[in-house]
Image (tube, helix red, strand yellow):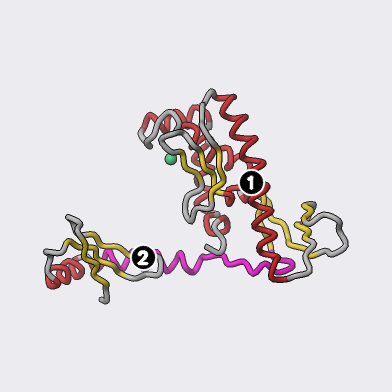
Amino acid sequence: MQYIIKRSKRRTIALEINSSGQIIVRSPFRISDSFIDQLVQKKKQWILNKIKLINKRILKKVIKRFGEGECFLFLGKKYKLRINQKQKEKIVLNTEICLKEKDKLKIKENILNWYKKEALMYFSKRIKFLASKYDFKYNNIAISNAKKRLGVCNQYNDIRINWRLILSPIEVIDYVIIHELVHTKIKNHSKNYWNSVNLILPNYKKMEKWLKDNREEVFFND
Ligand SMILES: [Zn+2]
């Protein structure tokens, strides 16, 4: 089994499999190569299981080419991309996403910018509404471009929501917003925290399931 050893001033050993399936051992300086090798052998089954899982994830990855006819999610519904030079507006959403763009290389940029613009408009309004409805106080709202997370609330109660969430159905968006708003009062994921979420959204587990089932589609090309 091949692995990379990275030594540093840390105190403990950690085994890690990165997203391309490489095995990395993070170790303090004083630990010998042979000790590390024994550890890797001992953990062989765990490593193999992890690699299997990562490979599965790589296979499921959704890669968009941004070509005509390709499907894109918006507020939980699928729309085909149509290129139409005759329309006035840059992007029109009806039964399809219609884009006016002559330059094929700019299609991706147009679509991503449109998602981000819609996300900012929709999320700002919705956070304001849900915060006043359920009596939460937050500081700032921003749109994020995070690789993995859809929402985050920091210690100053600034809320950041990933633009990719605009691909989800509105009830899923509400769940992520409520999730972060509850964090303005409770900073952890304790039982108390989940009880508070449950009081507002008794069916929040259904939303989590949607996010899990559609994760690759929401995080396309990442
Ligand atoms: Zn959380």
Identified by mark 2, the residue type is Asn
Is 55 above or below relative to 198? below
44 or 166: nearer the eye? 166
Please give the residue where the numbered disc 1 appears in the rendered image. 119
**Residue count near mark 2 (Cα–Cα under 10 Å), binned few <14, some 14–19, many ≥20:** few
Numbered tag placed on residue 25 in the rendering: none
Q: Does the residue labelled 2 lie within 8 Å of ligand 1?
A: no
Identified by mark 1, the residue type is Ala
170 or 204: nearer the eye? 170
Report the side of 202 relative to 124 (left or right).
left
Range shown magenta: 45-70
Q: Distance between the residues labelled 2 and 1?
A: 30 Å
Numbered tag placed on residue 18 in the rendering: 2
| Dominant secondary structure, magenta | helix
Q: What element carries label 2?
A: loop
Q: Position of residue 128 (x, y in %)?
A: 60, 31
- Residue 35 sits inside the magenta stretch: no
Q: What element carries label 1?
A: helix
- Residue 69 sits inside the magenta stretch: yes
**Residue count near mark 1 (Cα–Cα under 10 Å), binned few <14, some 14–19, many ≥20:** many
Is 216 above or below relative to 138? below
